[in-house]
């Protein structure tokens, strides 16, 4: 079930203006997913997940695209011929955009309204009830104040596309989501475990804080250079983790500014963040149902604190 055979196009050989025009396709931002979780928690309904099987094969393309016969499946009578595509294939430049247009057009035709700011959000009102749908390429999460609307939506989608229902939303974009009657909790404990193993830090000594309050990182031009690819890989992993861990945001962003020429002192600071994560893998974000659905914001600045250029470090935080 995990191993699939699929014909994939060599999209890197396509030429702009000939084989494709527009390629941009919007996808849901992590902030949008968190806001949807907060909304669902406040309105006391659960979110569900479904997946479209072979999503890109559901869409037609406007351009003329030709592909070679796949190796091992050549026509013995016409071995020198090529195929003209009538539908999209995986790895075509325009495939994600074509799929988004196909899905969004279908939803709008069925009475959904597309979000003005977030175009991956679709809403349908039915009297006092509301059905909310968020799409991320071929993954769809949805929920409603009336569970019958969820059932109708599932039937609607399965009637148009080949879908697989995955039940209540529990794992999405590497977020672990626990939906209970009184709270929604999200964290990335599994992701943390994977990254600790990847970077060989499973058995290191844990730390109680992500960064020392007395540390002042600078370019350290006299310091010993380290593997920049390793450093950037570690920073990229940590940046994705900030989706559920605002406690490491400042430390990660400070280290991320030094990716151009990382030194041993910088790598030591990054490893401390991982040691902190090893000590706190289960931390995450709570959404209690009895909290008010209000927007709170906070801003502060540490004037002239940057050791490199004496610029101010500003920070903002918004809670919904």
Image (cartoon, helix red, strand yellow):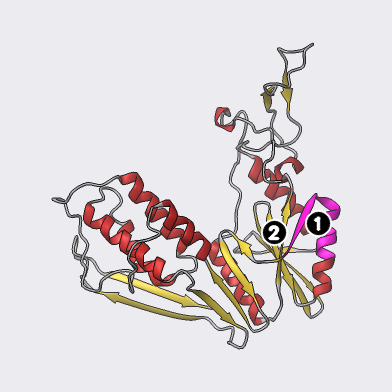
Q: Nearer the viewer, residue 33 or 232?
A: 232
Q: Which residues are magenta?
A: 152-167
Identify the residue at image location x=63%, y=36%.
92
User: Is 188 placed left or right of 48 in the picture?
Assistant: left
The quadrant where residue 293 appears: bottom right
Identify the residue at image location x=60%, y=69%.
177
Q: Is residue 158 visible?
A: yes
The residue pinned by badge 1 equals 157
The residue pinned by badge 2 equals 140
User: Is 217 placed left or right of 196 in the picture?
Assistant: left
254 is higher (above) or lower (below) than 104:
below
Is 160 contained in the magenta span? yes
127 is higher (above) or lower (below) than 100:
below
Residue 210 percent across, percent down from the top left: 33, 69
Q: Nearer the viewer, residue 167 or 291?
A: 167
Is 306 contained in the magenta span? no
First of labels 1, 2 by sequence position: 2
Q: Nearer the viewer, residue 128 or 245?
A: 245
User: Is 50 placed left or right of 229 in the picture?
Assistant: right
Cβ atoms at labels 1 and 2 below 8 Å apart:
yes
The quarter in which the C terminus is drawn is bottom right
The quadrant where residue 141 appears: bottom right
Judged from the image, the secondary structure of the residue bearing numbered disc 2 is strand
Identify the residue at image location x=66%, y=41%.
95
Residue 186 percent across, percent down from the top left: 56, 71
Residue 91 percent across, percent down from the top left: 61, 37
Q: CA distance from mark 1 to mark 2?
A: 10 Å
């Amino acid at each position: 079930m995990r191993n699939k055979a699929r014909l994939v196009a060599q999209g890197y050989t396509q030429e702009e203006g000939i084989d494709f025009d527009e390629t941009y396709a919007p996808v849901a931002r992590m902030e949008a997913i968190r806001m949807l979780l907060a909304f669902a928690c406040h309105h006391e309904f659960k979110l569900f997940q479904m997946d479209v099987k072979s999503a890109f094969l559901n869409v037609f393309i406007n351009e003329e695209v030709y592909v070679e016969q796949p190796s091992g499946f050549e026509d013995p009578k016409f071995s020198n011929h090529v195929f003209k595509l009538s539908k999209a294939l995986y790895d075509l430049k325009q495939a994600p955009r074509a799929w988004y247009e196909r899905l969004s057009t279908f939803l709008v035709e069925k009475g959904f309204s597309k979000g003005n700011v977030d175009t991956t959000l679709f809403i349908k009102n039915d009297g006092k009830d509301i059905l909310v749908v968020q799409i991320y390429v071929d993954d769809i999460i949805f929920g409603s104040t009336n569970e019958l609307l969820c059932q109708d939506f599932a039937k609607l989608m399965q009637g148009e596309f080949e879908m697989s229902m995955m039940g209540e939303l529990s794992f999405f974009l590497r977020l672990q989501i626990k939906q209970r009657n009184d709270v929604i909790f999200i964290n990335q404990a599994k992701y943390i475990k994977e990254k600790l193993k990847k970077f060989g830090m499973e058995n290191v000594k844990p730390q109680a804080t992500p960064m020392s309050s007395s540390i002042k990182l600078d370019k350290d031009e006299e310091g010993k250079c380290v593997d920049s690819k390793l450093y950037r890989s570690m920073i990229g992993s940590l940046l994705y983790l900030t989706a559920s861990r605002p406690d490491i945001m400042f430390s990660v962003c400070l280290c991320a500014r030094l990716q151009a020429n990382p030194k041993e002192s910088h790598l030591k600071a990054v490893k401390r963040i991982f040691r902190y994560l090893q000590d706190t893998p289960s931390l995450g974000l709570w959404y209690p149902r009895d909290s008010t659905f209000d927007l709170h914001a906070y801003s502060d600045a540490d004037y002239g604190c940057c050791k490199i250029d004496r610029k101010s470090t500003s920070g903002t935080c918004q809670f919904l």
